[in-house]
Amino acid sequence: MVVSSLLLLLLLPAVLGLRLPSGRMLAPRTDDGYTSQVSWDGYSFSIQTPSQDTPQRVFIQSGEMHTWRLPVPTLWRDIVQKAKAAGLNCISIYFHWALTNPKEGVVDMEGINDIQPLFDYAKEAGLWVIARPGPYINAETSGGGIPGWVTTLPGDPEWNPYNGELRSNDTYFHDAWQQYIRASAQLIAKNQITEGGPIILAQVENEFYNGAGQNEYVSELQDVYRDEGIVVPTMVNDAGMYKNIVNEANIYGIDAYPNGWTCIGDLSWPTAAAGWEKGPAAWRTYHENVMPDTPFMFPEFQGGQYDKWGSGVGYARCREVIGPEYERVLYHQLWASGVTAENFYMFYGGTNWGQLAYPATYTSYDVGAAITESRELTTKYSELKLQSLFLRSTPDLYKTDFVSNDSSTLTSNERVMATWLKNPDTGASFYITRQANVSWSDVESYKLTTEDFTLPQLGGELTLNGKDSRIIVKDLSVGAASLLYSTAHIMTSTIVDETDVLVIYADVGETVELAFDISEIITVDATLDVKSNISTTTAIVNFQMTTGITPIRLSGDGTSILVVAADYPTATTFWQPTIAGDEDFAAYVHIGANTPVLVVGPYLVRAATLEDNDSTLVLTGDLNATTTLTVIAADAIQALTWNGEPVSATRNDWGALTATLPGPELTPQIPDLTSITWKYTDSLPEIQPGYDDSQWIPANHTETTSKFLQFYGGPWKLGVASDYGYHVGNLLWRGHFDGNGQAAVNLSISGGFNFAAAAWVNDVYLGATEGGTMPTRNVSWAFPEGSLTEGDNVITVLQDHMGFNLAGQVVCCSPGGRQRDIQSPRGIEGYYLLGSDNSSVDQFTSWKVQGNFGGEDYPDKTRRIFNEGGLFGERMGYHLPGYDDSDWETKSPWDAIDKPGVAWYRTTFDLELPEGHDIPMSFVFSDDTGYYRAQLYVNGWQMGKRVANLGPQTAFPVHEGILNYRGSNTLALSLWSLGSAPEDLSIPSLTLQPSGTYSGGVGGVEVNNPEWEDRQAW
């Protein structure tokens, strides 16, 4: 993801003079340790597997997903299959250092940290993989993936305001990442293309910048890659057009998020429009000036946008802002700029379960991506599929030269821009047209002037919708046929029984025109009114698009062309599954797989095979309703099966197989959470008289590696909880003092954006504070009369950590104007007791601290370090299945507690959902506001944080595998009430709701929800 633009503005003046890029190409020479199986030139990448005689050009069409944001490994296969069905040929993944290496010397690559199944699923489906292990990944995850223990590294670099020097060749940091990167590199090496695996590129670091010790650090990382056997090309991704780290890897790419990072506002794409000259229009020029001898690659291009606490928006709006129109205009602009490798961030966003999120964002990481957090398909997915199938079937676009951007000579309307690209080998041309201003919404009419003629030739004009883009092709090979031009959108092409099949689409009522270069007079057979001009050299057809599928046949001696025309909504229901061959890399298009079948109608077609001597087409997929199935396939295919069941199909009058597929005929039986029994207990015994904290960690450090000086109080340093081994979740601090005239306490509490803290003196509530955008809150709380005793008194502070910031985040107005970065304090930076007249009084005698049970030595090796925080219920395992709550009070979350504090609720319920179905479900809170924070635990997994005074998230998807769809489930809630109003003291409602019912599904979803064990004996 893109680093803070403010950071870049701060750094650029210093870095531009440090190391200027030369633009040289690092060639893939085998004597330098690089494989020749992945090569490149200034146009595109090429891949050559052992079964191929020559390299094959590829257009890398990739989508980003993160295995760690979907903690059900079986479901990774679901996302991979949906990526392949969308026509993608690659996926990109970040690894996660903090999950994998939670403690110095401990590298955990088992369970949900074992990425090997993802690589296996990708190879099975026929997808390449871009591996991105970091170490720093940003990704809107806590600390950008940097483990908490790394934030406390020693060192005092002269120019750096933080301890140590993260992301540099500093010795301490160099030693810190060795184990993780070496383990990751070994995994990558084992799964790279040269070993029969799917990995073709390995990224080094992430969105980094030139600087003293930083370029060297990136080179050190690459050296480790080579030492561990990685021979595929390495790459870096600059956060923008900043010329950072240009020559430290084989491939240099840039990231771009033209619409910025907000879902708030109208749909006019104001940022994209304002930045057109600095961004999209400048992309090609920038690339040609910096790295012209390598493919133009966007390792990250905007596929959505993350939302923030308190936005009042939510991801439905994000998906609308960055919707199908945005995909057409901006993704086509990438092609117009010469891009032949693009990765969309995100294709599937997933969930910031546990404490994975960085402080500014919430549990959901849906980001308005093509696939929703609940793994459902969207209109964005459909548009991406149309574009990807076009790319897959149009290799002429993989190598093009820029010819012209002069709209005054290319179009008849100055409000319509055009870019002309031409393949130097085949002569194929691509005219990419779009509105001159990306925000314009009027429909424009125009004619296009090519090097040979003006289109359309048979009269009328072309039309361009507002905020839209159209690609007009010329001199393109379609199977054995030569497509002279097409003004319609092209989806794909194939060959069926020696007939060249071309699939096109347009809006209903739109006039389109196609021309074929032929050698004899042919006839045109169509069911609609077609204007035609047939000669001995050219066949032109012109017609208005109608609803549904319209076949148009052009036939004659030696010529057989089938144009399958569809309106846009119908086109989105087309699928082109691949048929794998027999050799290795058998599932990869252009290598071992072919695409001889078109399937129309189903919600999703996951895969296809041919059986019974290629006479039976075996389809697997999902249905959300009863569906008319249409299959365009060879006459030799006499039978169909769908998810293992025979399908009764007949040939229609233009040769396609048709059938009816029955949709899901069930209404899932979902329990009513308000009618089942709930159990309740207090989860803040720390404020009760006589509470024993003798086993807590003494917060008694008098030294710290942090360069953030303590404001006041002492002698102990409490500002950095990580100094005491606690890096995630809720924190509890207890300060002891002898009662002797104290009247108030003053605290400076620091945390991530939107952190919260509450305090008690003994068992008396003092109040709460929230950080908002401020990294530190200074508060003074007076002690109510009678709240102190003559002996030992205790201040208890409950603090929501909120995770670590990302690199380069600068927050204004913090005390002293200090920057706040990954290593910013999480704790109490100042503490002082006051007398009634602000006079000097006895101070604290000791402090204790508590966080997630065991800290870095957490006991739950399945759900891991980010799952839990320091609430008493979390430390005791109240959230885990099998905990004995029989002596708890019977009470539901909507029955209010009597004062601010922490309550814990548990219940169990059974699900009996049918196999062979995918039924995404979410736990949905009331959208009523209140001053409380609730955590949702499902079978021990923390799957949501509801902050009722911030929002906006109220619905929390929980996947099968976390939920047991055929068995017992444990649901637990923590309720932290920070206020005393009625709306602060209860959760108004909670329901379990399905968002859809789909027959099919990926199948075989494994459930792994270990039960409670006595932690005190652990």
Image (spheres, rainbow, N blue to C red):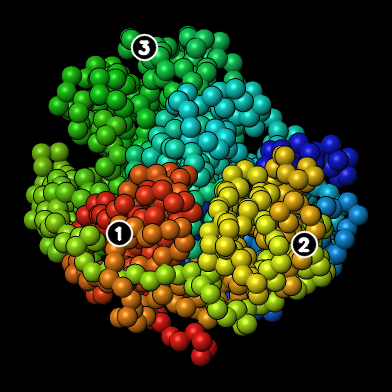
Is 286 or 429 nearer to us in this picture?
286
Residue at image coords 73%, 44%:
814
Q: CA distance from mark 2 to mark 1?
A: 42 Å
Tell me if I can see residue 286 in this picture.
yes
Q: Residue at x 24, y 75 (%)?
A: 967
Q: Which residue in the structure is indicated by mark 2?
A: 841
Are discs 2 and 1 less than 8 Å apart at CB? Answer: no
Q: Which numbered circle lies on residue 461?
A: 3
Of callouts 3 and 2, the N-terminal one? 3
Q: Is residue 322 visible?
A: no
* Quadrant of the rendered image containing residue 292: top right
Along the line of sight, the residue nearer the viewer: 442 or 251 = 442
Q: Amino acid at mark 3?
A: Glu
Q: Nearer the viewer, residue 548 or 161?
A: 161
Kind of residue indicated by mark 2: Val
| Residue furthest to the right | 158
